[in-house]
Amino acid sequence: MNPPSVTIKQTDDFEITGEGTSIEWAMACPVELTRIQHGPQMKTTARMLYSATGIYFLMECEDGILTCTKTEDFDNLFLEDVVEVFLQPERRHPVYLEYEASPLQKELPILVSNNGNGFYGWLPWNYRDARKCHLLTSVRGGYKQPFAPCSGWSAEFFIPFALMAGLTGAPPVPGSLWHGNLYRIDYDNGEAAHYAWAPVSGASFHDIANFGLFHFA
């Protein structure tokens, strides 16, 4: 089975709003995440663009309740409602960036080393200024509060290439091919419902052998 692929178009830098209202998003092709374990199929879409300085993401999630309580960055956000992005610029090197965003606008950026038998994440050093990601979130049909009822939420974020300094293959140029994935975990029903763009083995979102393809145009 061939891995899924998506073309990421180039843009000038723009301001994010948390709601995906910037006109630049009209040029980005949406991709849909599919439920791979537990729970109902709630619509989850993602869009991507890149500039000379970094990659933009817009992830939009249908939801019923914000099952999240963590109010600090760098916490274990994956234990509650979250969206995740995985970026592996060079297939030969089993090192990739993982970025997690919660509905409460908290983030977890880590660099992961994964030899296929085990993996571990490292927090970024000097995470500020040009190396810092930018995240904004919004909630539809409710409030941005723990366990608030809602109809959905969105995470819009920018990952600077400066954060990925030292990774072979970054930053990309037109024609570059990266591996990666787009992921979501939702806990509305008391157990983790997993959604992925590139199908993975079980519910292991670190299944790098089955990452999809990001084509930079």
Image (spheres, rainbow, N blue to C red):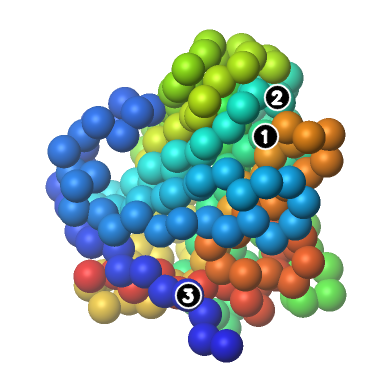
Q: What residue do we see at 51% from left, 38% from top?
A: 61
Q: Quadrant of residue 74?
A: top right
**Which class describes the residues within 10 Å of circle 2: few (<14), some (14-19), or many (20+)?**
many
Place of residue 26 in the rendered image (x, y in percent of width and height, measured from the top left): 19, 47
From this view, report whether residue 202 is shown above or below residue 138.
below
Residue extending farthest to the front is 40
Residue extending farthest to the bottom is 1
Q: What residue do we see at 39% from left, 42% from top?
A: 58
Which of 136/162 is in front?
136
Q: What residue type is labelled 3?
A: Pro
Left/right of residue 87 with respect to residue 148 in the rendered view:
left
Q: Name the secondary structure under disc 1.
A: loop
Q: What residue type is labelled 1?
A: Asp
Question: How many numbered marks are there?
Answer: 3
Q: In which quarter of the image is residue 206?
A: bottom right
| Label 2 with label 1: CB-CB less than 8 Å | yes
Q: How far apart are marks 1 and 3 (CA)?
A: 24 Å
Q: What residue do we see at 35% from left, 63% from top?
A: 171
Which of 73/215 is in front?
215
| First in residue order: circle 1 vs circle 3 | 3
| First in residue order: circle 2 vs circle 1 | 2
Q: Name the secondary structure under disc 2.
A: loop
The numbered mark at residue 68 is 2
**Which class describes the residues within 10 Å of circle 3: few (<14), some (14-19), or many (20+)?**
some
Residue placed under numbered mark 1 in the picture:
81
Residue placed under numbered mark 3 in the picture:
4
Place of residue 40 in the rendered image (x, y in percent of width and height, measured from the top left): 67, 46
Left/right of residue 41 with respect to residue 53 in the rendered view:
right
Place of residue 183 in the rendered image (x, y in percent of width and height, measured from the top left): 59, 53
Q: Distance between the residues labelled 2 and 3?
A: 30 Å
